[in-house]
Amino acid sequence: MSTTLPSTSDATFAADVLASDLPVLVDFTASWCGPCRMVTPVLEQLAEAERDRLRVVQLDVDANPEVTRAHHVLGMPTMSLFRDGEVVTTIVGARPRAAIDRALEPYLAAR
């Protein structure tokens, strides 16, 4: 997966996501997933535009089965927003930027 988004893993998930001061959008993805590749540029734009309010990371579901299983990810792309270590909303399937923004906005602090 060629992307500018940072990745997380089973080994680093707790530090990267659960302990983050900012909300973290985890993009559960796979290299073979066409819709995942379609949504990646949207998430890269989101990460840049909202960098003061949000972190966006990718997790390869094939390489990281523990986190994938623990969060009951069955379809991809699945994007889960974690705030204070808890999932506060989940988006399943490729969505346009406006739909992702609408889903996340209630959970992002004004800065």
Image (cartoon, rainbow, N blue to C red):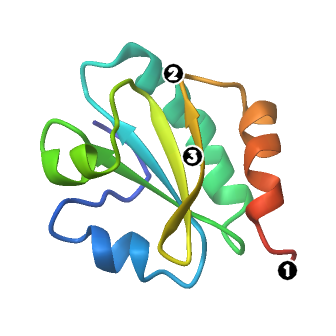
Disc 1 packing (10 Å; few <14; some 14–19; many ≥20):
few
Disc 2 packing (10 Å; few <14; some 14–19; many ≥20):
some
Give the residue drawn at x 64%, y 66%.
54
Q: What amino acid is labelled 2 in the image?
A: Met
Q: Earlier in the sequence, mark 3 or mark 2?
A: 2
Which residue occupies the foreground of this view, 25 or 87?
Answer: 87
Q: In the rendered image, which residue does mark 2 sit on?
A: 38
Spatial CA distance of label 3 from label 2 is 11 Å
Give the residue drawn at x 15%, y 68%.
11
Q: Are marks 1 and 2 in contact (CB under 8 Å)?
A: no
Q: What amino acid is labelled 1 in the image?
A: Arg
Q: Total number of numbered labels?
A: 3
Which residue occupies the foreground of this view, 53 or 89?
Answer: 89
Which residue occupies the foreground of this view, 5 or 56?
Answer: 56
Spatial CA distance of label 1 from label 2 is 29 Å
Q: Earlier in the sequence, mark 1 or mark 3?
A: 3
Q: In the rendered image, which residue does mark 1 sit on?
A: 111
Give the residue drawn at x 80%, y 74%.
109
93 w.r.t. 16: above or below: above
Q: Quadrant of the N terminus?
A: top left
Q: Secondary structure at mark 2?
A: helix
Give the residue drawn at x 50%, y 67%.
86
Disc 3 packing (10 Å; few <14; some 14–19; many ≥20):
some
Q: In the rendered image, which residue does mark 3 sit on?
A: 44
38 w.r.t. 49: above or below: above
Which residue occupies the foreground of this view, 54 or 1?
Answer: 54
Where residue 50 sits, quadrant-wise, is bottom right
User: Relative to 69, is 99 on the left or the right?
Assistant: right
Q: Residue furthest top?
A: 34
Q: Secondary structure at mark 3?
A: helix
Spatial CA distance of label 1 from label 3 is 20 Å
